[in-house]
Amino acid sequence: MHRTLIQPVIRYGYVPLMLLGVNGAAVALAASGASKLWLVGLLLAAIGCSFAAERALPYEQEWNSPAGDGGRDVAHASVNELLLLVSVGIIPLLAATVTVADLWPHSWPFALQVLAAVLIADLGITLTHYASHKIGVLWRFHAVHHSIKRFYGFNGLMKHPLHQTLEMSAGVAPLILIGLPLDVASALAVTVAVQLLLQHSNADYRIGALKYVLALNEGHRFHHLKWAGIGDVNFGLFTLVWDHLLGTFSYDPARRFTSDQLGMAAKPNYPTGYLAQLAEPFRASGSCHTADAPTDDEVLSAARD
């Protein structure tokens, strides 16, 4: 297909493909009781779609090229996806030991059960994310994610494993307490991975007015602005509903993002190697103050850019 035809298809069709196509396949397979081996294949397909869309219609061409971070990002993604799969595998054990009451709406259509799980998990993950920008010990681990200097799909999977475990626990624990079924948990795991790929995508897609409701890349780029305070916005994983309620929603259609605006102004020399990033939160140098405010000149520069 000619490039001029591919680009409009990606611009307006990529998000529906991922949200409805990939997630829809996850829901259908989970509902049918298919082998959990499909989970890995579906995740790999989603990652492939992410890379293909970014190369065919990039927001920033240079973000498609590794800057000494390719191997590190693959390591983060591999470890964190493995943790996600393991967490799904232990759901039955957890459900058998910590479920307080089986209040799960088993009679609902399966797709509606998954949607309910997504919305409940969204609240727990969003509040943990918000707290990670306010509490120093949590920020130490979350800072790994904010050290990025280019914004592309794999960034969503670039997290310290302990912080990812904390976020997912906050999202899934309430569900387990009320009897989350394993098949719903499996579908939820896929939706989380798909959402992270979309949220950090370098694909220049459009979702219209939905950008004020869904936590996708147009809004999430503002969260990665490097200045403390300015980047403390748009915390939601799946939706921006909680950001509107918390007063942390931000969007400016005139802003254009470059690598110079990403990362952490307070720690521009954050370690870039995988093992170094795993160790940094435990070092004295890992205490990057969350309250470090930008200077007046930085605020004015950020507003102009």
Image (spheres, helix red, strand yellow):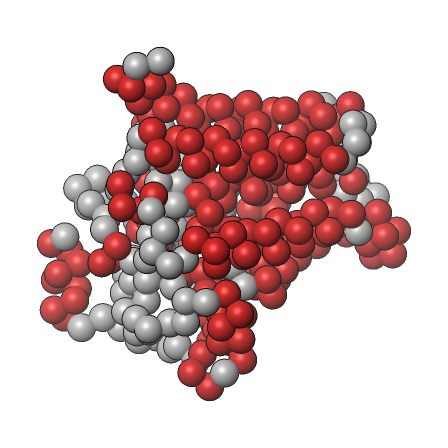
122 to the left or right of 116 = left
Q: How many marks?
A: 0
Please tell me whether residue 292 is drawn above or below residue 150 in the rendered image. Answer: below
176 to the left or right of 218 = right
- Residue 250 visible at all: yes
Please tell me whether residue 31 is drawn above or below residue 94 in the rendered image. Answer: above
131 to the left or right of 178 = left
Image quarter of residue 133: bottom left
Image quarter of residue 152: top left
264 or 121, which lies in front? 264
151 to the left or right of 43 = left
Viewport quadrant of the N terminus: top left
Please tell me whether residue 147 is drawn above or below residue 57 in the rendered image. Answer: below
Q: Residue at x 72, y 25 (%)?
A: 29
244 or 48, which lies in front? 48
x and y percent of residue 294 in the render?
A: 22, 70
x and y percent of residue 138 in the render?
A: 52, 71
Q: Residue at x 67, y 38 (%)?
A: 40
- Single out the residue that lies furthest toward the right: 96
